[in-house]
Image (cartoon, coloured by chain):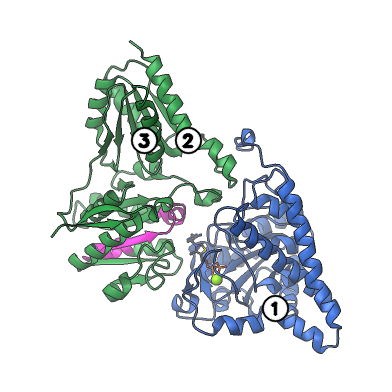
């Protein structure tokens, strides 16, 4: 029975995990510090107590964690593995890219890997270069892996459940700066949604912004500032990046004629480049050259004022939108 | 001599405590890992390193940097994003380096320093330095593939790496004993043919002897060694850790055996005047207050320089 509860992102993730463990007896939940301590961000608190040995702690062995997920998934389990920071997935990339992504395809579907990797990424003030990266594009370059980046409590709940229910290896990328955010009304217990989909956060006719992840909040702030000046912007938050809702972007870009993509990940080779390429290939006519904002191609320094100079800020989004709208003036 | 040791350990403790204050007061932001209670391993091991030797530490590395001779002011400045920081604010608490002091960096990826240390020893084979490459990591890191690969690589190629495993019983919030079936971590190394010892890491003499032998072996071309140093952190994994995983009474016991309390007792039992013993703490705290105050007055690193140093 669907019900409405007040949850922050951490609570929403916890609720989704609890429901999955409750309703899908084949699920397993494991990772470093997730069981007894309840996770370094407290997101998995109470789950081991409730679900017993299907929730457990592992050694600091990401390769074994993910390889074991591939193996257990092929024998009917549905593992949900927490990789504490996406940066740590790099020590186990073989298991994601060469193993999980290949299983279904090369076996002609005889073997599958219905596993979910829950991880989180992004810069937070003071974080070091090895705890700040946004690596979704690495995963999006790998056919066979599904990728989602929910942000709000409701999406964190819905997307995680959809990912767990999906029969493909799926990476759900969260953001630690959001876990303890303010509580919002979240509908829990409703039908599990299919994977895919976007959220239209603002409706407008002067420009289209496509964005994903925590930086969406900055986009919305910038758009709301311009709203007061009579500039209206269509904001499409791509909660799912694979599958990506290309059609909705094309429809919006065709209508507004101006396109900006914003992500926290590095510009070069970022998924924003792919979005612009899809729009260019579609032949949708734009009134002015499209833009993208992302991390200036750089490593990420620990000092907050240095990192802020490299990562897109609300003002950068606002300026880019102003230029875009001025550039395509009729 | 023993008083010098006490002073060296107090320098680390006072640095860490000052860092904690600055983190709680605001000038330092982000995640910070302190090594209170583990000072003897850094002090003892670094006392045996020569200038040409290379040290690779972890995010819990401030004390190792101090023991290697990195000026505290530059460490404080680094953690506060000052232009005078060892890396001008790029590295931060968990990822700074000062190769000019033989401190080749902290690392925030568990186990990642071990293979790099292997490379430092490999270079030493060709550059005539007889360099010993020391990599220090935690008990939890023993379960990381990179560490297993690095150990066997060094053993097979006979490279002068000193693997120092600081066993503080916990990997973040999880006891190491729950994450291994064989609690003797040194056996990982001996199984690979690496001479391995388990020592009381709170005992400076044991740390010194074990590292002296290991560095000598490395310098003589006799290959790698492994030291499992048992110790304890008497603070959280990071600043803000609520430490709910600690069994009742554990911290109280640890506070008795931790190296500063231990050496203090020894000195007093040896008849060293209380005044001399207390002077070590006072002096260390004064030094750190002065260093931190200077760092606080230093200008912040300039955002206009944020893109520098990416490529040659
Ligand atoms: C590859 C990788 N996995 C996970 C982490 C997260 N993490 C940071 S410290 C830590 C615990 C390490 O424990 P140990 O090696 O015993 O060192 P200690 O912190 O006790 O000094 C973990 C799991 C990481 N930084 N890198
Ligand atoms: Mg440890």
Question: CA gap, disc 1 to disc 3?
Answer: 53 Å
**Left or right of residue B169: residue B74:** right
Q: What residue sits right under mark 1 in the picture?
A: B259
Is disc 1 on the same chain as disc 2?
A: no
Residue A289 on image: x %, y %: 38, 18
Q: What residue sits right under mark 2 in the picture?
A: A313
Task: Identify which residue is drawn at 63% across, 51% down.
Answer: B27
Task: Identify which residue is drawn at 48% across, 70% down.
Answer: B173
Indicate which quadrant contains ligand 2: bottom right
Check disc 3 and report its element: helix, strand or loop.
helix
Check disc 2 and report its element: helix, strand or loop.
loop
Task: Identify which residue is drawn at 21% across, 67% down.
Answer: A22
Residue A51 on image: x %, y %: 27, 73
Q: Residues within 10 Å of mark 2 (few under 14, many from 20)?
A: some
Residue B306 on image: x %, y %: 61, 37
Q: Is residue A299 magenta?
A: no
Check disc 1 and report its element: helix, strand or loop.
helix
Depth check: give the residue in front, A154 or A79.
A154
Task: Identify which residue is drawn at 28% across, 17% down.
Answer: A285
In the image, the segment drawn in magenta is: A69-94
Q: Is residue B70 visible?
A: no
Drawing shade for chain B: blue
Q: What residue sits right under mark 3 in the picture?
A: A220
State which quarter of the image contains the C terminus of chain A: top left
Q: Residues within 10 Å of mark 1 (few under 14, many from 20)?
A: many
Question: CA gap, disc 3 to disc 2?
Answer: 11 Å
Q: Counting residues from the N terminus, which is met first, the one under dot 3 or under dot 2? A: 3
């Amino acid at each position: 029975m669907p019900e409405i509860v007040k949850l922050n992102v951490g609570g929403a993730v916890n609720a989704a995990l609890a429901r999955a463990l409750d309703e899908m007896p084949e699920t397993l939940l494991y990772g470093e510090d997730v069981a007894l301590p309840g996770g370094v961000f407290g997101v998995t608190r109470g789950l081991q107590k409730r679900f017993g040995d299907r929730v457990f702690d592992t050694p600091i062995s990401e390769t074994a964690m993910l390889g074991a997920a591939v193996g257990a998934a092929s024998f009917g389990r549905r593992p949900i593995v927490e990789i504490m920071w996406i940066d740590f997935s790099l020590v186990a990339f073989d298991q994601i890219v060469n193993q999980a992504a290949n299983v279904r395809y090369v076996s002609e579907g005889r073997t599958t890997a219905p596993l979910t990797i829950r991880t989180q990424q992004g810069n937070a003030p003071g974080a070091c270069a090895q705890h700040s990266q946004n690596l979704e594009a690495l995963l999006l370059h790998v056919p066979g892996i599904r990728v989602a980046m929910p942000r709000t409590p409701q999406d964190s709940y819905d997307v995680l459940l959809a990912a767990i229910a999906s029969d493909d290896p799926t990476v759900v990328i969260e953001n630690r700066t959001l876990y303890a955010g303010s509580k919002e009304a979240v509908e829990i217990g409703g039908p599990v949604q299919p994977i895919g989909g976007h959220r239209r956060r603002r409706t407008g006719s002067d420009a289209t912004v496509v964005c994903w992840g925590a930086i969406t909040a900055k986009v919305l702030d910038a758009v709301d500032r311009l709203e007061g000046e009579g500039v209206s912007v269509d904001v499409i938050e791509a909660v799912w990046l694979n599958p990506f809702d290309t059609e909705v972007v094309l429809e919006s870009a065709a209508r507004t004629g101006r396109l900006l993509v914003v992500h926290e990940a590095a510009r070069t080779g970022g998924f924003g480049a792919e979005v612009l390429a899809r729009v260019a290939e579609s032949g949708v006519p734009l009134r002015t050259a499209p833009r993208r904002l992302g991390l200036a191609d750089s490593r990420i320094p620990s000092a907050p004022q240095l990192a802020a100079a490299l990562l897109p800020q609300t003002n950068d989004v606002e300026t880019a939108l102003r230029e875009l709208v001025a550039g395509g003036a009729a | 001599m023993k008083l010098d040791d006490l002073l060296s350990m107090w320098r680390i403790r006072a640095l860490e405590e000052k860092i904690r204050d600055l983190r709680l007061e605001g000038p330092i932001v982000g995640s910070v890992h302190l090594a209170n209670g583990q000072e003897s391993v850094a002090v003892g091991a670094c006392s045996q390193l020569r200038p040409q030797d290379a040290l690779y530490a972890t995010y819990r590395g401030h004390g190792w940097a101090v023991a290697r001779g990195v000026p505290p002011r530059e460490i404080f400045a680094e953690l506060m994003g000052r232009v005078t920081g060892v890396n001008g604010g790029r590295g931060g608490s968990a990822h700074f380096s000062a190769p000019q002091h033989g401190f080749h960096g902290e690392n925030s990826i568990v186990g990642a320093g071990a293979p790099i240390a292997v490379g430092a020893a490999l270079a030493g084979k060709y550059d005539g330095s007889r360099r010993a490459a020391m990599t220090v990591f935690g008990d939890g890191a023993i379960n990381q593939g990179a560490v297993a690969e690095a150990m066997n690589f060094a053993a097979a190629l006979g490279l002068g790496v000193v693997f120092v495993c600081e066993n503080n019983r916990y990997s973040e919030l999880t006891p190491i004993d729950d994450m291994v079936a064989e609690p003797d971590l040194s056996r990982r190394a001996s199984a690979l043919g690496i001479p391995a010892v388990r020592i009381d890491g709170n005992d400076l003499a044991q740390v010194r002897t074990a590292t002296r032998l290991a560095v000598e072996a490395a310098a003589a071309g006799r290959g790698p060694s492994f030291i499992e140093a048992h110790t304890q952190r008497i603070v959280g994994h990071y600043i803000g850790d609520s430490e709910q995983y600690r069994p009742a009474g554990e911290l109280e016991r640890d506070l008795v055996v931790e190296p500063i309390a231990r050496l203090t007792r020894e000195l007093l039992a040896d008849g060293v005047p209380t005044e001399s013993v207390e002077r070590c703490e006072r002096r260390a705290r004064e030094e750190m207050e002065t260093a931190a105050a200077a760092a606080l007055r230093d200008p912040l690193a300039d955002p206009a320089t944020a893109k520098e140093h990416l490529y040659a």
